[in-house]
Amino acid sequence: MSRPPRVLDPEIDEAARAVFLAQGPSAPLQDIAKRLGISQAALLHRVGTKEALMSRALRPVPPTALALLEPGPKERVSIEDQLLEALLHHRDFLRQLVPWLFVLHYSGLGGARAMQLETPPPVALREGLTKWLTRAKRAGRVDLARPGAVAEALCGALEARCFNAHVGGTTYAPGDDEAVLRQLIRVLLPPREAPARARKKPLKRKPG
């Protein structure tokens, strides 16, 4: 008798995600096992229960944009461009995360219990962005009274667009993400004016 194929944990998680996202939390384990080329019994032996598999396969991970924010503002790149890069990176992360959250929310696990993390992704991103903006403020790159409030506005707007797009497509989130985010950054972080002493005085006309 031939031995069953060896399946790695990441392969199990990937197959489970694909099936749960396509069919929802009621998807049968048999479909996941079939995708992996193993029996349902072998799959259960590896994962324990369907709930345990769903919880681990769809468990949120820390926002990947934190790696862009951690070093702080770059000197030779505009604040606007750096923020836009980080936010677009986080948008791609949210596009993957939001469908996972919907499946977990409507599962028997309950979203809150299944998604317990030391620092949930939305909170982690807000904290990282607040620290980044605070460093930019201290360096004199931005003029902000409350960096945390700006971080909340940017994160909240981006999350709303991603949730709306998942529910209703582009009809619910009209406009180009990059253009919308760039405009929002410009509203929340207006360019700093040059110091008064550095401004050029208008030239006086010589009497003719």
Image: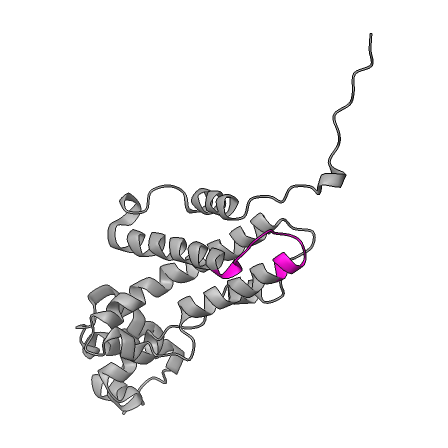
Q: Residue at x 65, y 50 (%)?
A: 77
Q: Residue at x 34, y 84 (%)?
A: 5
Report if residue 37 is visible in the image: no
Quadrant housing residue 58: bottom left
Front one among 205 and 129: 205
x, y percentage for residue 140? 67, 54
Q: Residue at x 65, y 52 (%)?
A: 141
Q: Where is the N terminus found, in terms of image quarters?
A: bottom left
190 vs 163: above or below: above
Position of residue 98 in the picture relative to residue 30 (left or right)? right
Front one among 28 and 198: 198
x, y percentage for residue 82? 58, 53
Front one among 25 and 114: 114
Q: Residue at x 63, y 65 (%)?
A: 71
Q: Where is the C terminus found, in terms of image quarters?
A: top right
Asked whether residue 141 is drawn in magenta, I would say yes
**Which color scheme is applied?**
one colour
Quadrant housing residue 120: bottom left
x, y percentage for residue 189? 54, 48
Asked whether residue 83 is drawn in magenta, I would say no
Q: Which residues are magenta?
A: 135-148
